[in-house]
Structure formats: C-alpha cells, structure tokens
Image (spheres, rainbow, N blue to C red):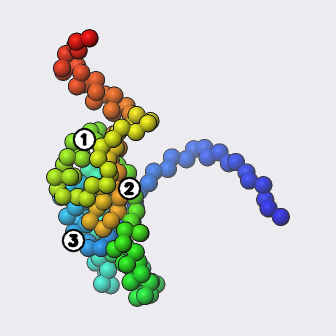
Amino acid sequence: MTRPSRQVRATGMNLKLSSWALAVHDLNEALGFYRDVLGFEVHADAESEATRRVSVGPRSQPDMQIFLQSPGTDPRVSPADRQMIEDLMANGLLGQRLVFLTDNCDTTFEHIEAAGAEVMQEPINQPDGARDCAFLDPSGNMLRFTQTRQMNRALAYRRTSREGPQAP
C-alpha cells in the first residue's frame, strides 16, 4: 500500500548552501582557474592520507566553499571504480554544473574567454529576460554565468542614460 503524499510547509527555516564538492582532474590546474581566472579566495589547501582537498569560494560569499578534489578520493572507492570515474570525467560525461550570478554577463564572458577557458555558450538573452553564457572549467565542469533580468534592465538603463536621449 502506498502512502499518500503529504505537503509539508517549511516555516521558520532559512537554508543556505554552504559547500559543494567538485571533482577535478588536476588540483593545481583547477586551483589556478578558480583562483586566478574567477578571482575566488582560497579558504583551505590541505593534505591527509595522500588526499589533497582545496576549498575556494567567491569573495562576495565568504561562507560558501567549493571543495576541489580528485575523483574517487573516498577511501572506499576501489581502484577500478576510481579509474571508471576518471574515464567518465575525461569524456565529459561526469561533469557537474555550477551557476553564478554576475552583474555584467558580457564583461564576465570577455574576461573568462581571454583567459582561454572553453566556451560552451556565448552571451545570449533568455526568454525570461536573463542574459547568460557558459564555459567548461579545465576538468569539464560546466559553469554558467547569469545576469538576471533586473540586472540586465539596470545595465541597459545606465547605458541609455549615459548616451542621452535617442532620436526617433
């Protein structure tokens, strides 16, 4: 017998994401990308039992940590499974997706493209009014950079107010 689904309203809860584990091929290469290209702060860089984990995060969110770690770092993962994970990552089949807000999608795109990151999508306007672009990090994880509709409108307003009245 199946139990009927029950709607439960969460009240008094204020949840925030505090960390995310991201599998990467090469920790030094990933650290260079997230620190030097994206400008993230390094929170921790620690080694224990031949496993290195690096924690980075956006300067605007000091409580948010992205843990960069080699695939299959869990000691319970067998060598065969570890190899399978690495093969899936190498073929782009195990990449994860992270979405970041930006106040200027085009400027963000130009900066990351100039650093040599693989472009997945050039900046485009979405039907909901947002503008976004996408890249792959050095390990094949997709990173999207979204300028919300409100930010898009504010940026357009600043441009038109600087340019002055438009001719009909």
- Name the residue that disc number 1 marks: 106
Mark 1 is surrounded, within 10 Å at the Cα level, by few (under 14), some (14 to 19) or many (20 or more) other residues, namely some
Distance from disc 3 to disc 2, alpha carbons, whole Å, reads 20 Å
- Name the residue that disc number 3 marks: 28
Q: Closer to the N terminus: mark 1 or mark 3?
A: 3
Indicate left or right for 110 with 81 as reference: left
Quadrant including the N terminus: bottom right
Give the residue at x 40% y 88%: 79
Distance from disc 1 to disc 3, alpha carbons, whole Å, reads 28 Å
What label sits on residue 87 in the rendered view?
A: none
Indicate left or right for 42 with 97 as reference: left
Measured as percent of width and height from the top left, residue 82 is found at 40, 82
On screen, residue 150 above or below 24: above
- Name the residue that disc number 2 marks: 98
Mark 2 is surrounded, within 10 Å at the Cα level, by few (under 14), some (14 to 19) or many (20 or more) other residues, namely few
Asked whether 131 or 99 is in front, the reply is 131
Give the residue at x 57% y 44%: 12
Looking at the rendered structure, the secondary structure element under dot 2 is strand
Quadrant including the C terminus: top left
Looking at the rendered structure, the secondary structure element under dot 3 is helix
Looking at the rendered structure, the secondary structure element under dot 1 is helix
Mark 3 is surrounded, within 10 Å at the Cα level, by few (under 14), some (14 to 19) or many (20 or more) other residues, namely few
